[in-house]
């Protein structure tokens, strides 16, 4: 049975994640993550194919690259959550999201295809989180040189998506 995941304290994550965590509404995080998966997929599949390669400014990612980045980041954060939840105390390295985006191959794909991949990644995240207990969510590890809890990683996953969907709506699709 899934446990309620309390909002993490500021001591459970690096300050640079605060905006993501604050962007997650109060309530049951697992319910939010499920609804977010459904709503995000519907939103992404409503984007015209002609907008997939659009970037709102020189040097910015395309719509497709943003969608790929959301999935890549969720994979990394979920992997960190798994390692820490299982009691692994090995410090986990950071990752360069720009380097990932450069070689992601997102430009060769459709937004619909990337949306399907996002849904699979999210389902895997939900499968992991749904089966953790309260002790696992409270465990602390180290990632990118900072202490971080499993519950903070779960909130970062949700808040990171909130952030990038807002950016897609405001800077990419409003243009």
Image: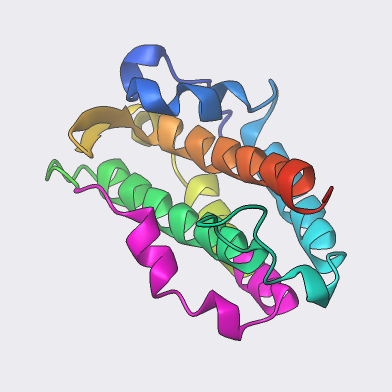
Foreground residue, 17 or 151?
Answer: 17
Residue 129 appears left or right of 25 = left
Residue 106 appears left or right of 83 = right
Is residue 38 visible to us here? yes
Residue 57 x %, y %: 61, 53
When asked about the image quadrant of residue 100, the answer is bottom left
From the viewer's perspective, is residue 156 above or below residue 39? above
Residue lying at 67% horizontally and 53% vertically, measured from the top left: 56
Is residue 2 visible to us here? no
- Residue ranking furthest to the left: 90
Residue 156 x %, y %: 49, 36
Q: Is residue 107 magenta?
A: yes
Q: Is residue 170 magenta?
A: no
Residue lying at 84% horizontally and 47% vertically, measured from the top left: 174
The kind of secondary structure the magenta stretch mainly shows is helix
Total numbered labels placed on residues in the image: 0
> Which quadrant, please, contains the N terminus?
top right
* Magenta segment: 93-119
Residue lying at 74% horizontally and 52% vertically, measured from the top left: 172
Residue lying at 61% horizontally and 61% vertically, measured from the top left: 67
Residue 151 x %, y %: 44, 31
Foreground residue, 46 or 80?
Answer: 46
- Residue ranking furthest to the front: 58
From the viewer's perspective, is residue 175 above or below residue 25? below
From the viewer's perspective, is residue 124 above or below residue 126? below
Residue 122 appears left or right of 171 = left
């Amino acid at each position: 049975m899934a446990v309620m995941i309390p909002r993490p304290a500021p001591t459970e994550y690096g300050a640079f994640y605060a905006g993501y965590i604050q962007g997650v509404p109060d309530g049951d995080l697992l319910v939010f993550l499920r609804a977010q998966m459904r709503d995000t997929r519907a939103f992404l599949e409503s984007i015209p194919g002609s907008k997939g390669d659009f970037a709102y400014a020189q040097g910015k990612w395309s719509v497709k690259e943003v969608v790929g980045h959301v999935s890549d980041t969720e994979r990394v954060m979920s992997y960190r959550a798994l390692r820490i939840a299982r009691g692994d105390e090995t410090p986990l390295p950071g990752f360069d999201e720009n380097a990932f985006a450069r070689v992601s191959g997102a430009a060769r794909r459709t937004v619909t295809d990337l949306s399907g991949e996002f849904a699979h990644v999210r389902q895997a995240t939900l499968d992991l989180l749904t089966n953790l207990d309260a002790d696992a969510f409270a465990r602390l590890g180290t990632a990118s040189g900072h202490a971080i809890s499993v519950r903070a990683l779960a909130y970062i996953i949700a808040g990171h998506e909130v952030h990038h969907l807002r950016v897609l709506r405001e800077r990419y699709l409003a243009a």
